[in-house]
Amino acid sequence: MQAFQVRAPHDFGIVDIDAPKAINGEVLVRVAFAGICGSDMHIIHGDNAFVRFPRITGHEFAGVIEAVGESVEGVAVGERVCIDPVINCGECYPCRIGRPNVCTRLEVIGVHRNGGFEEHVSVPAANVHRLPENVSLDQAALVEPYTIAANVLERMQPHEGDGLLIFGAGVIGLTILQVARAQGLSDITVCDVIDTRLETARELGASHTVNGQKEDVEAVMAERTGGEGVPLIADAACVPSLFPSIVRMASPAGRIGLLGFNATPSDLVQLEVIKKELTLVGSRLNNRKFPEVIEMLASGRLDATALVSHRLPFAEMSEAIHMIDHHPEKARKVLIDLSA
């Protein structure tokens, strides 16, 4: 069978490999669709500290179960599923307190073990989620990025009527926008430096947009909030130099959600945090958010297809990578059709 393999940084392509088998406790999935994520690009460029090479990437995917291993219950051959990439030990401190997404022995499908950019993949049965009839496989391949959004929003604990400021109108920023609207938030401002991305944010329901290169974001938000500040700020731009400004813009009792893996230090004025009693929360992957997002798709509160800018066959993976690298302003979510 064929798979997209990253052999080493900048060394990648479609290769022929032996098909995996469904071992004990796992199921074999015939992959239908898979999405290319920014973290896949980090692996390709050697910027992911967690990956082990060579690696078949892909952690956003959906397909059909073709075989089940021994001791597997609750799922059957022929069922349509999407896959939560978070594999946890169930024993360490984070797991014991219900935070498996930061398990001390965490494994992520597509990072620590082979992922969805292959025609067949074997995954733990505990990680598959069956799909309602009205959720298509292409939508299901995009459940994972929406779980990132659902996770950071839960970490920030929105209250009814809260205003939300999202930094970054890339894929994660747009999923946060969509999930926040689906959860009932209506006062949502999106900040980016690319006008086309801000246009997309408005199309997806942002009530306000700000171009950070053309406008003073702090002044704009001060005017919009009457000087009170913003209750909720999600940093999906992940630019460390923005952090002091984000802290200044937060309202007293505000909550700031951080998503970036950038190792560059950020300035932090403790006085700003303490006098406002701010809550700063990190958010990594998702903490069992797949059922919630699947329900949003099934109910029509989320439209995952609105996120897709390109659909390409598996044979054009290298072209897709080149487009994302060289024309990121044109690519929101690139969806790969492995059945084409």
Image: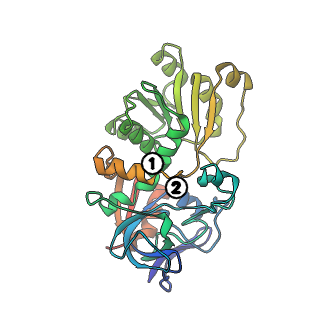
From the image, tell me which residue sits under label 2.
38
Residue 192 position in % (x across, y down): 48, 36
First in residue order: circle 1 vs circle 2: 2
From mark 1 to mark 2, how far is it between C-alphas? 9 Å
Front residue of 178 and 11: 178
Crowding near the residue tagged with mark 1, few <14, some 14–19, many ≥20 C-alpha atoms within 10 Å? many
Q: Which residue is rendered at x = 33% and y = 63% of the image?
A: 137
Residue 267 position in % (x across, y down): 72, 32
Name, please, the residue furthest toward the bottom: 18
Q: Which mark is residue 48?
A: none
| Residue 292 vertical position relative to residue 32 in the rendered view, above or below | above
Front residue of 223 and 29: 29
Q: Which residue is rendered at x = 69% and y = 57% of the image?
A: 92
Q: Element at badge 1?
A: helix
Front residue of 108 and 2: 108
Is the Cβ of the residue at disc 1 closer than 8 Å to that at disc 2?
yes
Name, please, the residue furthest toward the top: 226
Q: Which residue is rendered at x = 30% and y = 59% of the image?
A: 132
Report the number of numbered marks: 2
From the image, tell me which residue sits under label 1.
171
Task: Say which amino acid is labelled 2.
Answer: Gly
| Residue 302 vertical position relative to residue 88 in the rendered view, above or below | above
Residue 298 position in % (x across, y down): 30, 51
Residue 330 appears in the figure: no
Which image quadrant: the N terminus?
A: bottom left
Q: Is residue 50 left or right of residue 29?
A: right
Crowding near the residue tagged with mark 2, few <14, some 14–19, many ≥20 C-alpha atoms within 10 Å? some
Q: Element at badge 2?
A: helix
| Residue 85 vertical position relative to residue 96 in the rendered view, above or below | below
Q: Is residue 28 left or right of residue 297?
A: right
